[in-house]
Image (cartoon, rainbow, N blue to C red):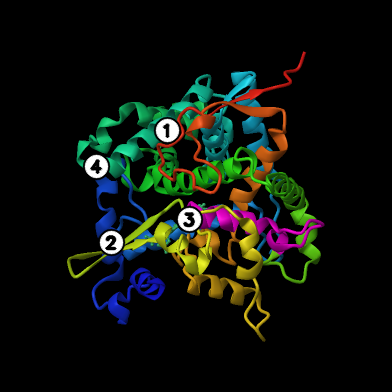
Amino acid sequence: MVKSYRDTIRFQPNGTKYKGRHLEARVLPNWDLVEKFGIYNAFTSKMKSTSDANIKEAIEKMEAAIHLGESDRSQDWRDLMAQARSGLYEYMKQKGEQVDLVELVRYITLKTSLNYLFKDAKAAEKNPEHFKDMLYVSSHLNELLVTYERAADRLPGWSEQEDLHAALRRVTLSIPTYVSALNSTSTRAKRANSKLPEPMQKYRNPLNLLMHAYDTIWRVVLRCFLEIRFRNAENGPEWSEMMKHYTNMLWESAMIDVTSDNRFVGPLRKSSTLSLKPHFIINEALRLYPPISRIQRQYDGELHEVDLEACHRSSLLGDDDPLVFRPERWRDLSRPRKNDYAASSAKREQERLGFMPFALSCPSNTEKTKEFGTKMIGMLVGILCTELGEEWELKDGRDDLPELGKPLDNDRGAYPTLLLANQKPCE
Ligand code: HEM
């Protein structure tokens, strides 16, 4: 199964190189994204120039987000961490002692993503409606995606989503930029404005970058955090400590990496004082809950589907307890093969066993971006573990979680009522 899935992803249906156009093979199954979300990017464009430009832009944004220098490839996560933390405090300030966990996870992921993807996003936070807009964008986008997955034909076209367009404009553009864009008359100003995010302009739709980058991350962060903190797993406290420790290491990453011999590996795989390593926990979340659970290709009019979730839950990767969240299994899965000590060898071996949450092509999982996607997941989970300590308990929604040993629901609409309450409120 794994080999045939890998072949499907790599444009080699039945083991032979596909002679048709590779871009089309990937784009055709995603075609509805154009009509329903106005998306023109690597997932939907048949034009190589558009696809390449989207990938290049995504890579540049990720590199800039962690301040990767040209000559010195060290990374600095402090800005992103500060944004995620301040997002959490903003949310808590507005919501008081009771926290809707799904809403909070979406909020901090959206805030962090907007900030590194859009130049004006920080200034846009001054807009008076900002908090309301953020909650609206995250919940409405999710509702649309739920409908899209269940019955895409019931979804109105993108041009009809006027409230979402307006909210997206407000969270990506500051008021001065927005006003000057409306009133610009000079050619120079018009040229500058033609690069600003605009939901109704196909190449400028903020969702071209935002939707995938944000939506993949929040869902796996939520599940990882739930597994660590709210399932009464025996090793849960140790996992939580590990992720707190991880955020500390990431905070210091600028300093660590400059002197590190293996810059790619960086803080993600550094040994800690504890017996586990953070990437075991992140990998286990990506294994059990891959945010993109199905990959599709269309070869010669025929749809080929890769069920990544099933692949990740097979006994090859999951041993005799594939449905259990057990990060410790990655101790064995991360050992390089005999006589081969290169870090990438372990990664290749994991792929051979079927671990492909990034479908072998996502730029957020490469050396160039220093495994940005995986680290973002770890950073957000670590911040949640740090900021929502033992005093926070699930008040509502605990009964919706399955018994320990069974996997959480991986559906994007799952767990709408997880309410956290502070058991020791401040006086
Ligand atoms: C961490 C969570 C993420 C996961 C699990 C993930 C997963 C994936 C997968 C499965 C694909 C391939 C889809 C296919 O071939 O049909 C993909 C492609 C892509 N991803 Fe991600 N992704 C993540 C984060 C990101 C982020 C943060 C960015 C950018 C900011 C990004 C940008 C892209 C782009 C541009 C492509 C298209 C690549 C190409 O066409 O060669 N991803 N991702």
The residue range painted magenta reads 266-289
Front label number (4 vs 2): 4
Front label number (4 vs 1): 4
Residue underneath mark 3: 57
Residue underneath mark 1: 168
Q: Quadrant of ligand 1?
A: bottom left
Q: Which mark is residue 152?
A: 4
Q: Residue at x 67, y 86 (%)?
A: 339
Is 254 left or right of 369, judged from the image as shown? right
Q: Looking at this rendering, what residue extends furthest in the bottom direction?
A: 339
Q: Residue at x 74, y 62 (%)?
A: 270
In the rendered image, the quadrant that contains the N terminus is bottom left
Discs 4, 1 touching: Cβ within 8 Å: no
* Amino acid type, mark 3: Glu
* Amino acid type, mark 2: Lys
Q: Counting residues from the N terminus, which is met first, the one under dot 3 or under dot 1?
A: 3
Q: Is-magenta flag for residue 277?
A: yes
- Secondary structure found at label 4: helix
* Amino acid type, mark 4: Ala
Is 264 left or right of 289, judged from the image as shown? right
Q: Which mark is residue 46?
A: 2
Is 305 left or right of 331, judged from the image as shown? left
Query: CA separation, marks 4 and 2?
Result: 21 Å
Q: Residue at x 60, y 26 (%)?
A: 91
Q: Main secondary structure of the magenta part?
A: helix
